[in-house]
Amino acid sequence: MMGIPTDEESLRKEFEAMAARSGLTIPADRQQMMFETFLDFRKVLERLHGPRDHTAETGHVFSVDHVVRGADHE
Amino acid sequence: MSETPLYDLSIAAAGRKLRDGALTSMALTQDALKRIARIDPAINAFITVTHDRALADAQAADAAFARGEDKGPFQGIPYALKDIYDTAGIRTTCHSKLRVDHVPAHDSAVEEKLHAQGGVLLGKLATHEFALGGPSFDLPFPPARNPWNTDHATGGSSSGSGAAVAAGLVRMAMGTDTGGSIRGPAALCGTVGIKPTFGRVSRRGIFPLAYSLDHAGPLAWSVEDAAITLNAIAGFDARDQGSAQMPVPDFCATLDHGVKGLRIGVPRHFFEKAAGVSPEVLSAIDAAAQTLAQLGAVVEDVRLPDYDLFAACGRVIMFTEAFAIHQKDFQGRPLDFALSTYSRMVMGAFVTGPDLVQAHRLRRELAHAVTNMLQRYDALLTACTVAPAPLIQAPRDRVSDSPTQSMPFNVTGHPALSLPIGFSSDGLPLSMQIAGRHFDEATILRIAAAFEAQSGLNRKRPALAT
């Protein structure tokens, strides 16, 4: 099974593909800086992954008793 | 006994003089406008000074007093708004080239309330671009500077709000807080700043940074003034779909109740070994904890999940939500953003769907951990910033550009405030952060008030303010 890429060529391809997927054309003079920022940010993303099983749901911070959702907008 | 200068009168004290007839709103307002003209060029707190509007508001407030009308503590009191709060007919720029000429048709909910209560709008304040990118020198307006030393940053993103309150240009300035943007500038500028519980104050008409992390709240020179402001602006708004339908207490009612018997937990592991932590900050927090213990609180170390989990969770959610909001402009006008805004917000493009789900699963775990701890303790005491204000020109970390440790309570939605606790050897403010149970702003204000009364720190202003 393939693991998460860690070599620079693969990471650069990932960076370029995700930027393109989001419709971004990163200005040429920012490319390297943004790639380096992306590498730092990947370390942040890694911290999200913990030992959770299928019962670990997402949720907002309150029970529905307190927050009215879906209020009308003008 | 010398008279307190007008700028140094609190909202409460000015309010008493307005009602006694010893002072007019016009006098307060004209004094504020003169001070802004004299002092603001050094600190760039204001983007727009609403000179004529302020005088008209003051005249209306004085006329209302003369008729025997009293709309509440904000009648006749000058204030200012971070320039992401919509103000009808007055430009609201978000400190960005992309909105430099934007004039909203409607007031934000907070402005509606303050105006209806007879407040006096002095103007719109500098902010980091779209409440994220700064301090930046590649924007239409200069960044705000720290009144304690103008070579230093204010913190952000409510940069102008912190600077304006510290310099005595306003008694209260509204900010917003998505990862610390009220508490950070409050800490670095030596003011009080409170991020209420998520949903406590309407976000309607405030340009969003991240929907699920944004909070609106005040910066003020005193705890009492922060509490008075919260009284004026809190409450359910059916037109803000994050608004909480919860009773609003009188946040001033228990300010003088002291801390005897309150249990305060200190997650020391958050800050004691943080990168760049200042020994002066550590000493000041220890001294503040001892002060609260001497005043009768039980203060104990506690253990929460690691700080970097809160930071990672919050940043991923923030950058993703922010990128979604601005995606079209990042595609079409990337160079119109400040570099610091672009480099951080665009990281939202690199978050996959599963990453975001993991962030929200982690968010639930972290919120429960803090809520569970607050079943055993009445409040938590931690660092707000781990170092005094950096130099405004200092290079910043690309992903996180400040020494602020405030993200946990944006992730969890708990109320949290920042309060001055001393000064560095360089004369820059030091602070602590107090967080409490959901919708229990009253207890954290009470603890802050007790400490403030003991410390007397709000008697000292920056030199340029006097």
Image (tube, coloured by chain):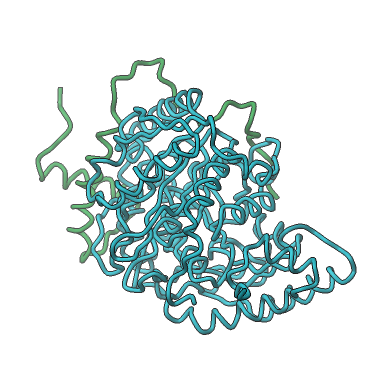
Chain colours: A green, B cyan
Could one spot residue B327 in this view of the protein?
A: no
Could you say which quadrant of the image residue B312 lies in?
Answer: top left
Relative to B299, residue B287 above or below: below
On the picture, is B8 further left or further right than B166?
right
B265 or B76: nearer the eye? B265
x and y, in percent, of residue B292 in the image? 46, 40
Res B273 quadrant in image: top left
Residue that lies at the very extreme toward the right in this rendered image: B67
Identify the residue at horizontal 63%, vertical 75% (top origin).
B3
**Residue placed at 65% from the left, 58% from the top?**
B108
Give me the residue at 86% from left, 63% from top: B69
Task: Quarter of the image for the N terminus of chain B: give it.
Answer: bottom right
- In this rendering, is residue B325 above or below B44? above
Q: Position of residue B384 (x, y in %)?
A: 39, 48
Residue B337 lies, with reference to residue A45, above or below; the image says below
Q: Please count the marks in the image.
A: 0
Q: Is residue B86 visible?
A: yes
Q: Report the front residue among B132 and B279.
A: B279
Q: Taking A9 as reference, is B465 above or below it? A: below
Query: Does residue B341 appear to the left or right of B236 in the view shown?
Result: left
**Residue B283: x %, y % from top left:** 30, 47
| Residue located at (30% from left, 32% from top) | B306
Q: Position of residue B446 (x, y in %)?
A: 57, 42
